[in-house]
Every structure is written in C-alpha cells, then in structure tokens.
Amino acid sequence: MSKRTYQPSKRKRATKHGFLVRQATTSGQKVVRARRRKGRAKLTVKKAR
C-alpha cells in the first residue's frame, strides 16, 4: 500500500502558500486581490510558528 498524498506540515504549508509567497509574484498578488474582492475571511494560510 502507498501512503496518502496529504501529509500535513504547518511549515511547508506556509512556505508554499503563505502571504509573503503570494506577494512575491504578480500572479500571486492577483490571487490575494481576487480573494479580497470576493470577501474571503482567510486570504492565505496562517503563518507557521
């Protein structure tokens, strides 16, 4: 049997999908902008501790 594909890690989650990562690229900024426009409560994932 193979492992499940989702093996959660807070650090990996933040470094891949965090706010600073989104702001680093133009397309990432578009993502945040679109989520703001839509009225999302969470724009990006929480920062890892």
Image: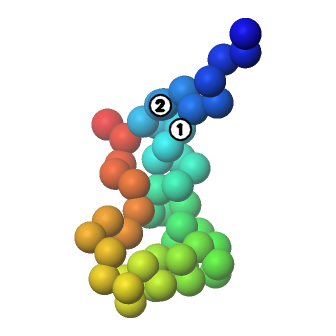
Report helix, strand or loop for mark 2: loop
Q: Which of 49 and 27 is in front in this view?
A: 27
**Residue at 35% over, 49% down:** 47
Question: Quarter of the image holding residue 48?
Answer: top left
Question: Quarter of the image holding residue 10?
Answer: top left
Type of amino acid at the residue the image marks with label 1:
Lys
Q: Mark 1 points at which residue?
A: 12
Q: Mark 2 points at which residue?
A: 9
Image quadrant containing the C terminus = top left
Q: Nearer the viewer, residue 1 or 42?
A: 1
Residue 15 image offset from top left, x and y in percent: 53, 47
Residue 24 image offset from top left, x and y in percent: 59, 69
Type of amino acid at the residue the image marks with label 2:
Ser
Question: Quarter of the image holding residue 22?
Answer: bottom right
Q: Indicate how the structure is coloured in the image.
A: rainbow
Q: Nearer the viewer, residue 45 or 47?
A: 45
Disc 1 crowd, CA 10 A, few/some/many (<14, 14-19, 20+) = few
Is residue 21 shown left or right of residue 47?
right
How many marks the image carries: the answer is 2
Q: Are marks 1 and 2 in contact (CB under 8 Å)?
A: yes
Q: Which residue lies furthest to the front in this view?
A: 1
**Residue at 53% over, 77% down:** 31
**Residue at 62% over, 24% down:** 4
